Amino acid sequence: MTARIISIDREPEAALAAAVDALGQGAAIAIPTETVYGLAADATRADAINRIYETKGRPRFNPLICHMADLAMARMHARFDPVSERLAEAFWPGPLTLILPLLPESPIHDLASAGLDTVGIRVPQGFAGQLIRAFGRPLAAPSANTSGAISPTSAEHVAEDLGPKIPLILDGGASGVGVESTIVKVEADGRLRLLRPGGIAAAEIERVAGHPLERLEKAGAAIEAPGMLASHYAPDAGMRLNAAFPLEGEAYLAFGPGKVEGLEKARFTFNLSPEGDCAEAASHLFAAMKRADRSGARVIAVAPIPAQGLGEAINDRLERAAAPKPQET
Ligand code: TXA
Ligand code: MG
C-alpha cells in the first residue's frame, strides 16, 4: 500500500469524498488539523481503531482523542458541566482537548477510550471539522506518526513515516499551530487539571475558567495521561536544552533576535522565531527538529525558550524529546 495524497486546497471535493469512503471502510487515514496531522478512524469501530494502534505501534493502554464536528455532537458522547461548557464555547473549534465523563450511551468504542470512564474530546478547526460533519461520526485521531516519534506538521512528514502503511493522506499544507492541543481534565468538583500544555496557553484557559489550572507533578502525569511521559517526540540525535550557543558539529535551534556566539561551529542552524514569538516558534518546532535530526548532527542544541504562553508547550515537547529513550533506560 502507498498512500494516495490529495490536496484539500486543489481538490476539496475529491478529498472529502475519498476520506468519507475510506473511513466508511474502516481505514485509518491522515488528515490535517490546525495542531498537527492526525491519523483518523471511526471512533465507534473496533477494527478501525485497531488500525490506528497497529499503524502507529502505539500501546493500547494509551487512549485516543475523539474529534467532533461541534459542541452539539460532543454533547452526545460526554457530560458537560458549566465549566466545561464555558471552555468549549470559548475555545472550540480549536486546540483544546477536554477530558470529560463518557456517557454510557455513547457508541465510542472502548478501544478508543482504553476502557476509561472518561473521554478526550476536541473540535478541530478547518477541513477536519467539515470531514467529521460529512462522515457523521466522531473520529479517533492521535498524531499521524510512529509512536514516540516527532509529530507531523505537513503531509510530507506523514508520507515519509506512515505513507506505506495507510491508504490516504489529505494534504492541507503546514499545520498552523504546530504543537498538539492543550489537554485539560475537568474534575467532578470543578477543579481543572492541565494534563498536557499545548496550542492554547494555560493563562487563556484560566482567564475563561476564572480559576487556576492545576499542574501535574511530572511523576503523576504518567498515570493521568498514559503515554504522556518519558521519551516522546524523540529524534535520533541527542538533545541539549537551554543552550546559549552551539558546540562544534551540533545542530542549533535559535530563538529570538540576539546574536549567538559560535554559530559557525554548528552543522545546521535554524531560528525558531527571529522575533522571539512563542506562537511562531511552536509552528516551526517539529519541522525544525526533523531537519536538525536529518543534518546528521549527533546533538540538537536548543536556545532557552521562555516558559510563558505557548512556550510552556514548547518546553514540554523539548523535555520529552530530551528524555532517555526506553531502550536506553
Ligand atoms: O492536537 C492534538 O491533540 C492531536 C490532533 C491530531 O488532534 N492529537 C494528539 O493525540 O495529540 P495523541 O494521541 O498524540 O495524544 C492524546 C493524549 C494522549 O497522551 C492520551 O494519553 C491523552 O491524550 N488522553 C486521551 N484520552 C484521555 C483520557 N480519557 N484521560 C486522560 N488522558 C487521555
Ligand atoms: Mg502523539
Image: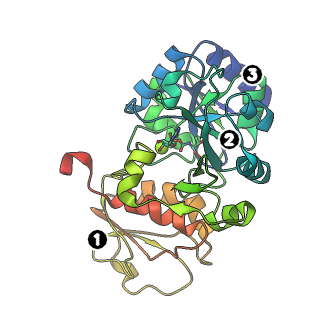
For the residues labelled 1 and 2, the Cα–Cα distance comes to 35 Å
Residue 287, x across and y down, in percent: 51, 55
Residue 126, x across and y down, in percent: 76, 42
Q: Secondary structure at mark 2?
A: loop
Residue drawn at point x = 61 percent, y = 51 percent: 189
Q: Secondary structure at mark 3?
A: loop
Residue bearing the label numbered 2:
172
| Amino acid on which disc 1 is placed | Gly
Q: Which mark is residue 249?
A: 1
In the rendered view, would you say 183 is above or below 158? below
Residue drawn at point x = 36 percent, y = 84 percent: 262
| Amino acid on which disc 3 is placed | Gly
Q: Residues within 10 Å of mark 1 (few under 14, many from 20)?
A: some
Residue 276, x across and y down, in percent: 59, 77
Residue bearing the label numbered 3:
136
Please indicate whether residue 148 sits to the left or right of residue 3 in the image: left
- Mark nearer the viewer, 3 or 1: 3
| Amino acid on which disc 2 is placed | Gly
Name the image colouring. Answer: rainbow
